[in-house]
Image (cartoon, rainbow, N blue to C red):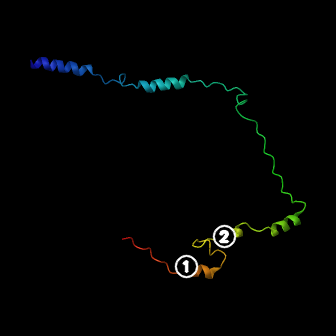
Amino acid sequence: MLRLLSQQAARSARTFSTSTASQRDVVQEFYIQGLKAYKPRPVPKDAHVGAVKPFSPPQPPQPPTLPADLAGELAAYDAAEPTKADEPVTRGSAVEDVGQGAEAFLSFLEADVKPAEAHH
């Protein structure tokens, strides 16, 4: 019985071959075969026609021109009242001290702040 087991073990050991033929990389061979068989297509000379728009440089900008009656327009601008001054200033906003100077701003900052009443 022991002899039979040792013969079977010897046969099964021989069936597994470690030769280089069975270890070849099929994927690598297929890849190399594909690289060798590759032939690039010739590109036609006018392949870009229709795919690329012809280039035309933009027109240069025109220099600004002065109006014929510049003095009249400047006088009209100086005579016009600004619209911001016509709006009333509301009390309690940060806008009220604008234009009154640094002293008014500092007095606003130094004014006592009333603490908020605690809710019971």
Q: Secondary structure at mark 1?
A: helix
Give the quarter of the image for residue 9: top left
Q: Nearer the viewer, residue 86 or 2?
A: 86
Q: Amino acid at mark 2?
A: Pro
Q: Name, please, the residue furthest toward the left.
A: 1
Circle 2 sits on which residue? 88
Q: Name, please, the residue furthest toward the front.
A: 120
Q: Nearer the viewer, residue 75 or 44?
A: 75
Give the quarter of the image for residue 47: top right
Q: Amino acid at mark 1?
A: Leu
Q: Nearer the viewer, residue 67 or 49?
A: 67
Give the quarter of the image for residue 15: top left
Badge 2 or badge 1: first in the primary sequence: 2
Q: Cα distance, mark 2 to mark 1?
A: 23 Å
* Percent of width and height locating residue 75: 85, 68
Give above or below for 111 relative to 33: below
Residue drawn at (63%, 24%), measured in percent from left and top? Answer: 41
Circle 1 sits on which residue? 109
Q: Is residue 64 left or right of residue 42?
A: right
Between label 2 and label 1, give the one nearer the viewer: 2
Q: Nearer the viewer, residue 53 or 67?
A: 67
